[in-house]
Amino acid sequence: MARCPPGNTPGPWLPGKPLLPVLARAYQRRDPELFGALLARDSERNAEYTSLLSGPTEFGELSWGWEDELRIHRRMFRPENPPPGEDPVPPALWLQAVDIDLQPLAAFQERDDLYSTEENCPDGKCADGKLDRKVWRVVYAQYSTDVFFQLAGERDYQVDGSVAKANFVVIEDRTKKMRDDGKFLLFVWEDITSPLLSGLLTSSDPRVPSKSVRPRRNRFVAGTLSRWETSPAHRIRRRIAPEVEPWSSCVVSSAPSWS
């Protein structure tokens, strides 16, 4: 049996930790299939992915499910091949590369409030809409989300991890073996916002945090300014711009859109 160095005694194993690196990998590879495979889609057992926004869009949306999330990411990761019937993504907004850094701000903890109190949940379907503890294990943690989107046009976009945060709720399917597909799934992605400057900035602008400075290109440091929170741009979880909703189906006035 392997021995741990002093100070590194393993604690209780929680399912959230191994999933987040895979989520980051899906972004780095711009892989919609890998991203989609991480989203919970088990409506028969009350386990369907939900995106929770930090504020309403201009259409009053506060959340959406896995179908909208995956559609947005397909347009983001594969802009040259939009789904049938959807408008093409403008070439200037085609994603070229993604730098993503997800850093835990606290250890994963179990979410007892998401378990059903019912003793009998036929086939894992609890009448109160919550999760059957015998089927699922639920944990959550808060992460900082630092993301840089390199685009084909003149502008790149930066989400500053010093203020951009998210709660990740991860579920483990207790009925599956460790290496089975769908053993660990993303159940809830909740945006948490903090005030941050917002606007088109260049690397010489003193307001730009040093870690987000990229040579020769303009960038948008996107944060949680109120108008940014309530715009359709909030459809993009790593929210991009106050008046641009790049990968959703909505077009905001004459602003460029990935829709």
Image (cartoon, grey):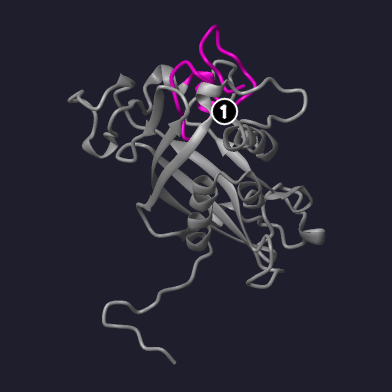
The residue at 72%/62% (across/down) is 119
Magenta stretch, main secondary structure class: loop
**Residue 192 point in image, percent of width and height:** 42, 37
For the C terminus, the quadrant is: top right
The furthest residue to the right: 122
**Residue 190 point in image, percent of width and height:** 50, 40
Query: Which is nearer the eye, 110 or 21?
Result: 21
The residue at 40%/23% (across/down) is 155
Amino acid type assigned to the residue bearing label 1 in the image: Leu
The kind of secondary structure element at disc 1 is: loop
Residue 231 colored magenta?
yes
Q: Which residue is mark 1?
A: 62
The furthest residue to the left: 206
The reply, left or right, for residue 238 in relation to residue 117 is left
Residue 55 colored magenta?
no
**Residue 247 point in image, percent of width and height:** 58, 27
The residue at 64%/70% (across/down) is 179
For the N terminus, the quadrant is: bottom left
Up-down relation of residue 175 to residue 130 (above or below)? below
The magenta segment is 230-259
The reply, left or right, for residue 14 in relation to residue 218 is right
Query: Which is nearer the eye, 102 or 151?
Result: 151
**Residue 9 point in image, percent of width and height:** 35, 79
The residue at 42%/16% (across/down) is 227
Q: Quadrant of residue 208?
A: top left
Query: Which is nearer the eye, 140 or 31?
Result: 31
Whether residue 56 is visible to the viewer of this picture, yes or no, is no
Up-down relation of residue 251 to residue 7 (above or below)? above
Whether residue 149 is visible to the viewer of this picture, yes or no, is yes
The reply, left or right, for residue 149 in relation to residue 174 is left
Query: Which is nearer the eye, 129 or 193?
Result: 193
